[in-house]
Structures are given as structure tokens and as C-alpha cells.
Image: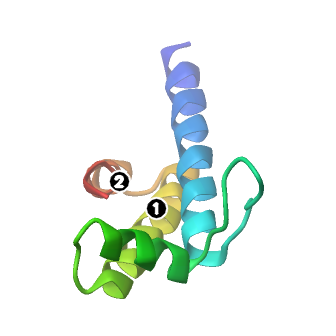
Amino acid sequence: MVGLGLFVLRLALAVVFLAHGGNKLFGLFGGPGIGAGGLSVTAAFFAQIGLHPPFLFALIDALVEVIGGALLVIGFLTRWAAIALSIA
């Protein structure tokens, strides 16, 4: 039963990271509540908070969230994905 609970928790967390990464990378799920997405918007945010080069950081952040979320879904390299996602 514990294994099922951990699977559901891992799946829920993966969905959250896939949704956020998809918004940052492709502009998915953009709307009135969330706002526009995409790499240019994410890079502008990173430039606003002082991270340079902003486009590189936006790309790395979006890829970590999408790839890390996908790894959590399939259950492969979950510890490494979790470490990368906690940093991103």
C-alpha cells in the first residue's frame, strides 16, 4: 500500500513539473490566470531578477522541469531528477 501512495505522489508531482515546464518552454496552458508563457517571457523574467544570460537560464530551467517531470512519470532516475528539480 505504501508503494501505491508513493506512486500517486510521484505522479502528481510529475504533472505539476510537466505543466510548469511546458508553460516555460512552449507557452502551454497560458491564460488569464497564469499569463503568457514561452522562453521569451521566461527569459525576460530572469533578466528582471538579474540572472544573466537570461535566455540560457530560461532554457535550462524549462528543460529541467520537462525532462525531470517525464523521468518522474516513468520512474527512471527519480532521485537524480528530484535533485535537479529541487535546484531548478
Q: Position of residue 73 (x, y in %)?
A: 58, 51
Q: Which circle marks residue 80 in the picture?
A: none
Residue shown at 60%/29% (left/top)? 8
Q: Residue at x 44, y 60 (%)?
A: 68
Q: Going 46% across and 61% down the picture, which residue do you hit?
A: 65
Task: Tell me the quadrant of the picture where the N terminus can be found.
Answer: top right
Q: In which quarter of the image is the C terminus?
A: bottom left
Q: Where is residue 22 in the image (x, y as percent from the top left)?
A: 62, 66
> Where is mark 2, residue-wise?
85
Query: Is residue 16 toward the left or the right of residue 87 in the image?
Result: right
Choose top left, top right, bottom left or bottom right for residue 74: bottom right
> N-terminal of the two: label 1 or label 2?
1
Colour scheme of the rendered structure: rainbow
- The numbered disc on residue 65 is 1
Count how many numbered circles sit on residues in the image: 2
What's the residue type where badge 2 is placed?
Leu
Is residue 14 toward the left or the right of residue 27 in the image? Answer: left
> Left or right of 83: which side holds 71?
right
Q: Dot 2, crowdedness within 10 Å: few (<14), some or many (≥20)?
A: some
Q: Compared to 70, does 46 lie above or below?
A: below
Query: Under tag 1, what secondary structure?
Result: helix
- Distance between the Cα atoms at labels 1 and 2? 6 Å
Q: Nearer the viewer, residue 30 or 14?
A: 30
Instruction: Kindly indicate the quadrant of the structure image that contains residue 46.
Output: bottom left
The kind of secondary structure element at disc 2 is helix
Tell me if mark 1 has few (under 14), some (14-19) or many (20+) residues whose alpha carbon lies within 10 angstroms of its own: many
Check contact, mark 1 vs mark 2: CB within 8 A: yes
